Image (spheres, coloured by chain):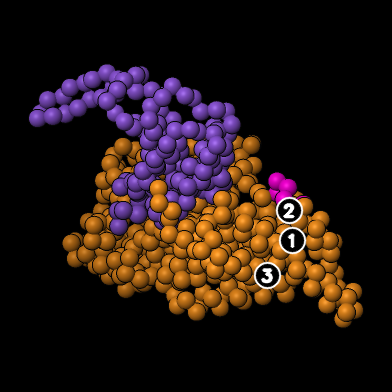
Amino acid sequence: MRFMTIVKTRETNIQPSPELIERINQVAADASGQGKFVGMGGLGTTAQGARARLSKGKITVTDGPFTEAKEVIGGYAIFDVASKKEALEWTRRFLEAHIGLWEQDLEVEVRQMMDDPSQGC
Amino acid sequence: MTPPRAADAIDAVWRIESARLIAGLARIVGDVGLAEDLAQDALVIALEQWPDAGIPDNPGAWLMATAKHRAIDHVRRRKMQDTKHEHLGREMDERQLNPEDALAESLDDEVGDNLLSLIFTACHPVLTTEARVALTLRLLGGLTTDEIARGFLVPKATIQQRIVRAKRTLAAAHVPFDVPRGTALAARLESVLEVIYLIFNEGYSATAGQDWVRPALCDDALRLGRILAELAADQPEVHGLVALMELQASRIRARVTPSGEPILLLQQDRGRWDHLLIGRGLAALQRAEAPGGGYGPYGLQAAIAACHARARTAEETDWTQIVALYDALAQLTSSPVVELNRAVALGMAFGPAAGLELVDSLKDEPALAGYHLLPSVRGDLLAKLGRFEEARAEFARAAAMTQNARERALLEKKGESL
């Protein structure tokens, strides 16, 4: 089963410290060493992004930043594990890596991906 | 986030930590059976303590520390017993005599080496293939006996027996807990790859039962392969196997109907292939080439799978290339099953008559007696040549031979539709 874990946080200009990045990479390396890591990525600021929207048959595009949003998606990681429980455990480790190194609240949404091979049968 | 339920969390921690834990302990006590018992003891203690005390900050380290205390106790006790009974002639690993040294040593960055040793031990040739499969899933995959039993559709007690016996056999044969070096490595690696691919295949085309595929087993095999690819990155065939499994797994979703009937490769909706896995498979294939050029048997099979993965439609398939790859594979393996596949490719590249000629030369091959794909392939080629009467008889023969209900239905339908 593949799970996408989506990291949400209040948007600030604070960059993660090299130490934090190293700790996060360690979690990724641990998962990778068990054949359970698919990939991860951090996202740039919403100021660099845009929103495209379909409503009532009309497409509109709005440039960032998304000032009205309380929380924005800051990054994601994809794990390939046997159960949701295990996806949650990797998420716990990911959050734990931030303790003492990241001031903002973090929320991770753990979602099973529907394009998983095991969904097909 | 509310704290996850303790039992769930312990289960997840076990899945993640058990292999490393058992490998580290086996390094200290030199016996994987005992190492697993010690790891299980630590798990039992965790199950008792964590629901009240809470989950420790670093659950893996907690389990390791707890198990190591028991390991050291055990080694000390054994040492005393051995001295008492004057079994001094018995050969003992120097490390076992100095548990503290062993502890310090195993704290070094030897995790990879320990895991690799565990894989090689679980797949040791002294064990039967069935025992290797069960032990590998149990020790490396962190699967419960129940899960393994479900995967292979055998009673739980059978798997339990297999694992107990396997541990006993390893201990009795004094199989060293190590990574084989030099000339022994190639043969031992072959056994490891065979076990992983067997697990994958049991998931990919279940030989028995109601379901044609059991994807959980494919996933377990893929994870084992990826672990091995990190630990033995200098072995081209490891990457060949991983490439083969990733590419085959990319088609799992497309190869069964929602009601579970098989869909054959050329009829599959390629839009449903998993492009993430195809990407991973093609990347692994690049690493599968031997330093001097060329592929081993797994690399060649992966290269064939890659030909299919690269073709956007079935009509675009480069059959001539596939025939060439099967030629190389047939030379390496001289396996009748490979010849049969080569016949299919020949039929696609150069017409059904060319394929049939090769199939007919395999008719009396003892290794293919009772193999349902022989009449099935012959039936396909005969049907393409318009020899429907003979084709029907072949499909009926094939249907009678297969153990898998889904596949039988497919073969019967093929015969009837002619």
Q: Chain of mark 3?
A: B
Q: Does the residue at mark 2 contact the one at mark 1 (Cβ under 8 Å)?
A: yes
The residues bearing labels 2 and 1 have C-alpha atoms spaced at a distance of 7 Å
**Image mark for residue B28:** 1
Of A28 and B122, which appears nearest the observer? A28
**Which residue type carries mark 3?**
Leu
Chain letter corresponding to the colour purple: A
Label 2 sits on residue: B106
Chain letter corresponding to the colour orange: B
Label 3 sits on residue: B34
The residue segment tinted magenta is B105-110
| Image: B92 above or below B194 | below
| Image: B383 above or below B310 | below
**Which residue type carries mark 1?**
Ile
The answer to whether residue B282 is left or right of residue B291 is left
Residue A30: x percent and y percent? Answer: 56, 45
Residue B264 on the magenta span: no
The residues bearing labels 3 and 2 have C-alpha atoms spaced at a distance of 17 Å
Q: Quadrant of the C terminus of chain A?
A: bottom left
Q: Which tag, 3 or 2, sits closer to the chain's start?
A: 3
Label 2: which secondary element: helix
**Residue occupying the point 43% across, 50% down:** A87
Q: Are marks 3 and 1 on the same chain?
A: yes
The residues bearing labels 3 and 1 have C-alpha atoms spaced at a distance of 10 Å
